[in-house]
Amino acid sequence: MLSELDKKARDILAKNDRGGFTIPTARLYPFQWNWDSAFIALGIATMDNQRAWQELEMLVEGQADDGMIPSIIFRNDDDDYFPGHKVWQTKNGAINGTGISQPPVLASVVAQLAKAHGQEGLKRAKALFPAMMKWHRWWHECRTPEGADVVCTVHPWETGRDNCPDWKIGLRNMQTDPNLEPYQRKDIEHANPEERPSQEEYDKYISIVKFGREIGWDQTLLTNKGPFLMADPGIFFILLRADRDLLSLAQELGFEEEAQIIAQWIKGAEISANQFWNEEFGAFCAWDVRTGEFSHGFSNASALCFYADVGTAEQREKTLSHMERIASQTKFGQSSWDPDAPLFESQRYWCGPLWCQMNYMIAKGLKEQGEDVLAAKMRDDLKNVIELSGFYECFDPLSGAGCIGHDFSWTAALWLAWASPSLNQQTPA
Ligand code: DGY
């Protein structure tokens, strides 16, 4: 039987439906977001398989000619959001999008739904396969800088972990463009400015967009000569996991040549994963590719090594001990930033709050690696915090207070697909 929260979660997804795709939340994020849609599809699939596939198909419609699937698909203008397409000015796809991407969870979600939906699932996955292949190729070719062998990122927004203190290093090493046009932020009209990125960070975010626009969004040039270049354990681990899932799909669907290429990507990533290991700190951390400087703090992306199935026994032990250290200080884990590191703020976006989609991926990885107790804790913490505060964008890990956007689609979706006790009694964490 559906609980009151199950019904509320369904209502949120219905309310945020814009005709085949789902926005994260009204006003604050009024378009289709890339990784949001992938997680949202998992929630919709608990009610309507057809509509879940449509969510993913409409995301792929936004693919740019070079293969990138943008972080935001702009099917319409909406002055509630800044920066909209008038600022990005990309011209490389059938539908307008941003000039950067977002963590590539799509293939993992497609593989999961294909497995659950029998012949129809395989048919829908087969139709999506070429676009996913093209997108993964884009990551491996356009986001691997010359002279490096890891996939990197050119913008904090591309990581999805916008203002995580990890990015302070890369942002400090770049200049705000002195000719930045005046602009008006909209996010702080819809949400508490104390929970959003700072003005200084926004000026740098927009400076990178200006640079991209001025080079016509040449993605190779943006990677090699852009103002910001960091290696993100989040993108790296999520892509490695998605490559593994794409390989399973390729094998099952008969894409033999593609399977060989994907296997090479996986092999390369397994070797280069160690470049993320910060020996001094004892965790997988972000680093600035140009200076080699490591971030010194445990983020929730550090915990995704299990999801990617990388790390030696010692590296995994150390990762688990960071998680235990953090759990001993928070009421609801996993916090997005390390409470013992500078710049931790429990309610400011990616400087501390708990995020449902990160808990979901972390728990999945832990469970697969036999860490059942901790995996169950990730799910329980999300369940408890939603029961306490509702369907927020993210949550204060100390108090459980909901932060920033409310009636949030991916929180509702992952409640339905994973955290709801009434709907997931049989599902292991
Ligand atoms: C925002 O506007 O805060 C988004 O996270 C950018 O993708």
Image: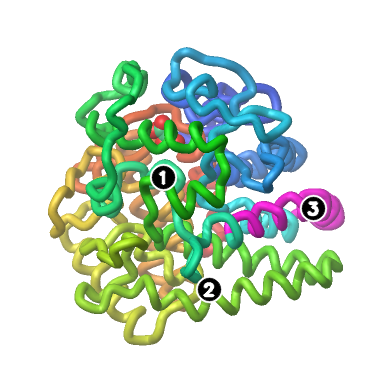
Q: Is residue 392 visible?
A: no
Residue at 40% over, 62% down = 233
Closer to the eye: label 3 or 1: 1
Closer to the eye: label 2 or 1: 1
**How many C-alpha atoms fall within 10 Å of the one at disc 1: few (<14), some, or many (≥20)?**
many
Residue at 44% over, 20% down = 81
Question: On the image, numbered disc 1 is attached to which residue?
Answer: 155
Type of residue at label 1?
Answer: His
Q: Does label 1 point to a residue whose CB lies under 8 Å from ligand 1?
A: no
How far, Cα to Cα, is label 2 from label 1? 21 Å
Residue 359 location, x and y as percent? Answer: 41, 55
Q: Is mark 2 on a helix, strand or loop?
A: helix
Q: What element carries label 3?
A: helix
Question: On the image, numbered disc 2 is attached to which residue?
Answer: 269
Q: Which of marks 3 and 1 is nearer the N terminus?
A: 3
Q: Which residue lies furthest to the top in this view?
A: 79
Residue 258 location, x and y as percent? Answer: 77, 67
Q: Which of 281 and 373 is in front in this view?
A: 281
Residue at 63% over, 28% down = 96
Magenta-colored stretch includes residue 102: no
Type of residue at label 3?
Answer: Gly
Q: Which of marks 2 and 3 is nearer the N terminus?
A: 3
**How many C-alpha atoms fall within 10 Å of the one at disc 2: few (<14), some, or many (≥20)?**
many
Residue 7 location, x and y as percent? Answer: 53, 31
Determine the main secondary structure of the stretch shown in magenta: helix
Range of the magenta residues? 117-139
Q: Which of marks 2 and 1 is nearer the N terminus?
A: 1
Instruction: Tell me the number on the disc at residue 121.
Output: 3
Residue at 59% over, 30% down = 90
